[in-house]
Amino acid sequence: MNEETLDPADWDELRSIGHSMLDDMFEFLQTVRERPVWQPVPDAARQELSEQLPRAGMPIADVYEQFKRAILPFPTGNIHPRFWGWVMGTGTPVAMLADLLASGMNAHVSGYDQSAVLVERQVLEWTAELLGFPLSASGVLTSSGTVANLIGLTVARHVAGGAEIKTAGVARARRLMFYCSAETHSWVRKAVQLLGLGDESLRIVPVRPDFTMDTDALQSLIHSDRAAELQPACVIGTAGTVNTGATDELRMLAAICRLEKIWFHVDGAFGAFAKLSSHAALVDGLELADSVAVDFHKWMYMPFEAGCAVVRDQAAHRATFESTPTYLAPLARGIAPEPLVMAGRGLDLSRGFKALKVWFSLKVHGADVFGRLIDQNIAQARHLASLIENSEMLELLAPVPLNVVCFRYVNRSHSLERLDAINRELVLRVQESGIAVTSSTMLHDQFAIRVAITNHRSRFEDFDLLVRHICAIAGEIDG
Ligand SMILES: *Cc1c(COP(=O)(O)O)cnc(C)c1O
């Protein structure tokens, strides 16, 4: 019998191409500023990426050539200094190396007596400290903010519904009610639907003119729900909304939740990290939450993916997800002396070593520089806002409390519809120019150009360039 393996027959050959891959990636990162932010994937590349299933292998050098030709040149552009669309992190060279090491180790980070679990525990403790939580808080790294938020809400549901929710499900419980603002990110719909609660269990609280939750409206909704024999279960606050970077009055929400004895969850996907900066007061009260979701792959600039759920009450977190079948039962010694600690804190059983890139980054760069970079991004957002305020052609459409700037081109002689159409075209032409990427949103039913800065490569001059470029293109569109 001819035994096979996926290890190379010639390690030296693989080593040599591996070294050139690494060199090429360093080059790619070092020269990113010189390339267009984004360009459409050309037809030739699309065709190359629509092939027959390869039954037999081919030399890695050939595959790598195809990668360099059809894949590497056509990303979204979020590693570029002038990418400010949606909320995407930039990535870092150090974290890239850590990902390589983690993939090589291929640790199964569900539990077990192994170093990778200790690294994740360490990262979770550091995260708790950075966010102002007690070190006794529980937590788990996740693929995304969506999943980290889902974990927070699942624990909230478990605490409100009692252990019976695991056996009888939500159908037998009194209807559990969740409250969030009209500016909460769309993950919340997925979460209440997945949890079997449905949209009708989600109360959308209106926002004030600064896009933060109207806490009076929240209180009256809670009271009318109680009067209707529904069970208020959880208030979801946001630290840094996706639309405008607004942060709900977290301290006030925490007080309401304490009074009403309901769970307080905070979606801090990017905004929670303002806690590391000199603008920590903006997210004051975050540390009072029962659970928080954050994304290292946004404002901590880590490569995708690394989200994180932090849950204050360890026991509640454990009780929500624990289940130990015989094939996972711990033995007193050996590799598995206790139940699988990380698998017992979320959805995934098989989990990768995401913690390593966070651990490496915090050690190599130190936590303080992340606070300074967040300050830098906030200062850049304020710089952009002042450029807009000083421009005859542009106007701000929302306050700029954090790192998100919403604005548009204005021309007083146009109708609102015409302005929306011009601004829509403007966003597209800026993207297609390759000079910068912004995204867009709707605020008070008006189309807004949206810049969200979670980018450690951006310089102040990049925003000067953006404004010049936008004004020039607006002039072209509007004659
Ligand atoms: C990005 C984002 C999310 C979703 O996080 P993912 O990691 O993209 O799943 C949730 N809330 C806010 C405020 C976000 O910006």
Image (cartoon, rainbow, N blue to C red):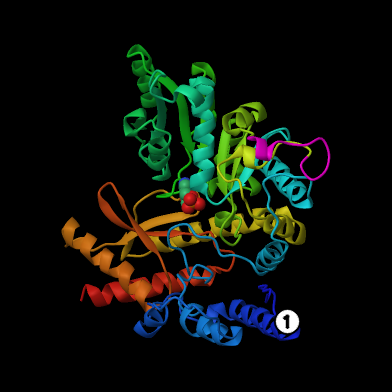
In the rendered view, tell whether residue 446 sits above or below residue 465.
Answer: above
Q: Nearer the viewer, residue 11 or 356?
A: 11
* Residue drawn at (43%, 34%) of the image: 195
Q: Taking 90 as reference, is 35 above or below it?
A: below
Q: Residues in magenta?
A: 325-336
Answer yes or no: is residue 256 visible: no
Name the residue type under label 1.
Arg
Q: Residues within 10 Å of mark 1 (few under 14, many from 20)?
A: few
Q: Please, what is the dominant secondary structure of the magenta stretch?
A: loop
State the image quarter where residue 112 is shown.
top right
Residue 24 is covered by the magenta coloring: no
Quarter of the picture containing the C terminus is bottom left
Residue 329: say if magenta. Answer: yes
The spot of residue 103 in percent (x, y) is: 67, 64
Residue at label 1? 15
Count of residue discs? 1
Q: In which quarter of the view is residue 304 placed?
A: bottom right
